[in-house]
Amino acid sequence: MSAGPGSAAARKSSAGPPIDEHCRRRPAEPLRPYVAHYTGYRQRGVPPARHRGLPSPFLTLIVTLDEPLAILAHPDPRQPPGRFAALLGGLHSAPALITHDGAQSGIQVALRPFGARALLGLPAGELAETDLPADAVLGAACAELRARAVAAPGWPERFAALDDVLLRLMTHAGPGPQAAPEVRWAWHKLLASGGALRITDVAAETGWSARHLTSRFRTEIGLTPKAAARVIRFDRARHLLIRHAAAAGPEAGPANGHRLADLAAACGYFDQAHLAREFRALAGCPPSQWLSEEFRNVQAGAWLFEGA
């Protein structure tokens, strides 16, 4: 049986050749309406780096295996930098800035907004634009999850521990209050459209006024419908940018203007300038800079901290 990344043997291995592991898996079937995927990561002996945790349609649960997660800047600039053994973050419309000194390891859970009620017993709106120590919401389940993940011999066993703990949380949360059908419908409609719908049209189809939909949607999701559509559209654009860059290879370099113009048109932006403005607002930098900074991750296929 191999040593887990939290063991003394694994920590000693950091002095050897660089380690860069990434693994993604879907959760157990009953969890899939609430959890999109798990991502495991372990790096040792790689260059120190900063990573932008970008807005996405998912809440984020990160459970570390060795070093704590170091966040230099949160989506809410009023929140001071911090280090987390386990982190829970809501939907947000500004980037986080994450750093490591050449070693990091953990598991990230991409939680769908309505999974907050099903697994955590509270609406996603209560977690919006903030990062919390995960045990503040998960209680003892957080410590159990981290202990089991650290002790597990490999990624399949860590993911199985996640399934076990989250399924138990789902059972304990029970049916409870549910989001209004109109809010659920509006969220899924925005997702399906890639964030390209007019909010007045979405509201009209629910039978609610835009003002009423906005109020109920923000309470449940944490963003207004307009902000959610903006995040969804941005998330689609950056994933298309990733796909193109990964297919083109490192020799192609950052996306050129022609490709960005095509991307803007495909994702419903007015033009390339509109896309660039949205990237600066939601990622904190232009798309070409972001891609240059993250290109190694593009090539590895490792998109850590989505929604962190």
Image (cartoon, rainbow, N blue to C red):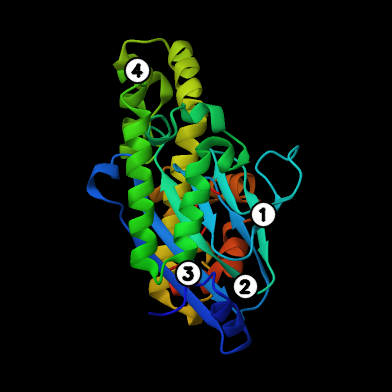
Lower position in the chain sequence, tag 1 or tag 4? 1
The Cα–Cα distance between marks 3 and 1, rounded to whole angstroms, is 18 Å
Residue 199 shows in the view: yes
197 sits to left or right of 214: left
Residue beneath label 3, please? 298
- Residue 21: x percent and y percent? 46, 74
**Residue 81: x, y in percent?**
74, 49
The residue most toward the bottom is 16
> Which one is nearer the viewer's eye here, 154 or 284?
154
Quadrant assignment, res 203: top left
Q: How many other residues sit within 10 Å of disc 1, few (<14), some (14-19) or many (≥20)?
A: some
- Nearer the observer, disc 4 or disc 3? 4
Q: Amino acid at mark 3?
A: Val
Q: Is residue 56 visible?
A: no
Q: Earlier in the sequence, mark 2 or mark 1?
A: 1
Mark 3 Cα-neighbour bin, 10 Å: few <14, some 14–19, many ≥20: many
Amino acid type, callout 4: Ala
Residue located 41% across and 19% down the image? 200
- Tag 3 secondary structure: helix
Label 2, on which residue? Answer: 103
Q: Residue 119: x percent and y percent?
A: 39, 36
Residue holding disc 4: 180
- Residue ID at (59%, 37%): 136
Q: Which residue is mark 1?
A: 97
